[in-house]
Image (tube, rainbow, N blue to C red):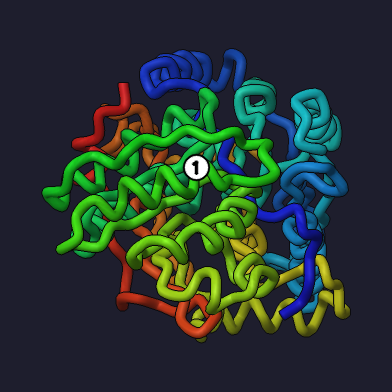
Amino acid sequence: MTGRPHMRSPHFPTITDRPVKATARAAAALVACASLAVGCGVIPGTTGGSGGDTITVMTWAPQDTKATNKPGMPAFAQAYARWVNAQGGIGGRKLKVLTCNDRNDSVAAAKCADRAIDEDVVAVVGSYSQYGDTFLPSLEGAGIPYIGGYGVTNAEFTSPLSYPVNGGQPTLLAGLGRELARDCGPVALVRPDSIAGDELPPLLNSGLKAGGHSDAANQLADERATEYARQSVRALEYSTTNPSNAGCVVPALGDRTSTFMDSFRRAREEYPDVRTATVLGNVDQTVINSTGGASTYDGSYITGWYPVASDPRWDPMKKVISEQAFGDNRIDPADAGVQTTWIAYTVFKKVVESLGDGEVSADTVRSALNSGLKVSTGGLTPTLRWKFQDVLASVGYPRLVNRAVSLQVVRDGRLVAARKGFIDVTKTLEGAKLN
């Protein structure tokens, strides 16, 4: 396992606009892009149609900040470019990857988008930013597709120029709720006292409701706290109210989840056993390794977008890392950001290959994606296909095309598959009360 900075995993401050507003925003963008002669008709990124041309893309993510950092994503994108170019490029065309540091800052995110436009990139691929509302309008105006964002903002599931490869936080929480409904007594959700945190209860409760379970207790916490003793006691008191059915505690505090678990580990000694559970992004294998593994997280359910890192379906990605990353310790194959970047570039490569000897531009890449192109990711996700309005448009997620999650569990300090295959949460989210 290679290391990466300890500012870990996104906290999902993410769903910043409500689904109704998001749907309205998507509709407005659709109108703006309805005619390629107006607004979206000025298309940068043309590379020409003959072999030997260079295709320029960009990957961005925050680095060297005091909040969430994802340096492995741009680092892997550059390794991928070296790898694919060593294989002769994509259809004989060289791949050039530009990177940008969005710094977890809306101004820096906007500057990354401006640079993408200035550099005539054909797509932004495999990126992370908490500021979709800031940069996506700029990409929409330039007609540049955003392929395989991390899924941390509502805008990624509403913009007609966004092509997400996972279901973001909505699918993870809905899937987790469904699983907890099977195995848990009272469920306590410990989440940030913030606008973003307000989005979490209905998503988790949609899964609990689908399994015939009552809503989770909604317990607020300061996302900047340095300890959570009081919140741990409250969660334990609620989750142990039914002595015949052990409850579950779901910490969803992003980078502070580990801080909560430190307090919780001490407090739980005075209470009956309960199970903990959370979603990928609050906890991953690196977090488990750094906080005592089995003693802290053993038995915890965690929902993720993809198979566990030990699954052989990741071997092609690991081959790229071993051949072209040159020991770069920013790139962790167990990091969901790196995994998302691999899948995003897999999609991009297949889009370019579908164009044959034709022109590769932001316009043609977008057109290929909009034409119903189906992309297989080697079993890492269901087959991907994007429509302007997918089945979850009615609840505010018209671009959420991958509604599958994997269920994982921590055993002896390792994340392993708790169930074979994926869990489809389409119907669960359709019944969610998000407005």
- The amino acid on which the numbered mark 1 sits, given as a three-letter code, is Gln
Instruction: Answer whether residue 350 is visible to the viewer in this image.
Output: no
Tell me the quadrant of the picture where the C terminus can be found: top left
Whether residue 316 appears in this view of the structure is yes
Q: Residues within 10 Å of mark 1 (few under 14, many from 20)?
A: many
Q: Quadrant of residue 145?
A: top right
Residue 185 % position (x, y)? 21, 56
- Picture coordinates of residue 219, whole percent (x, y): 42, 36
Say which of 355 and 65 sits in front: 65
Up-down relation of residue 241 to residue 110 (above or below): below
Please name the residue that numbered disc 1 is placed on: 231
Residue at 60 percent of width and 22 percent of height: 40
Q: Position of residue 203 (x, y in %)?
A: 34, 39
Is 409 displayed left or right of 349 in the figure?
left
216 vs 92, nearest the viewer = 216
Q: Give residue 388's quadrant in the image.
A: top left
The image quadrant where one finds the N terminus is: bottom right
**Residue drawn at (39%, 21%), measured in percent from left and top?**
23
In this rendering, would 206 be left or right of 296? left
* Left or right of 108, for residue 185: left
Query: Which residue is depicted at the point 45% across and 56% down?
Result: 278
Q: Position of residue 8 (x, y in %)?
A: 70, 55
Q: Is residue 89 above or below residue 40?
A: below
On screen, residue 222 above or below 405: above
Q: Nearer the viewer, residue 159 or 145?
A: 159
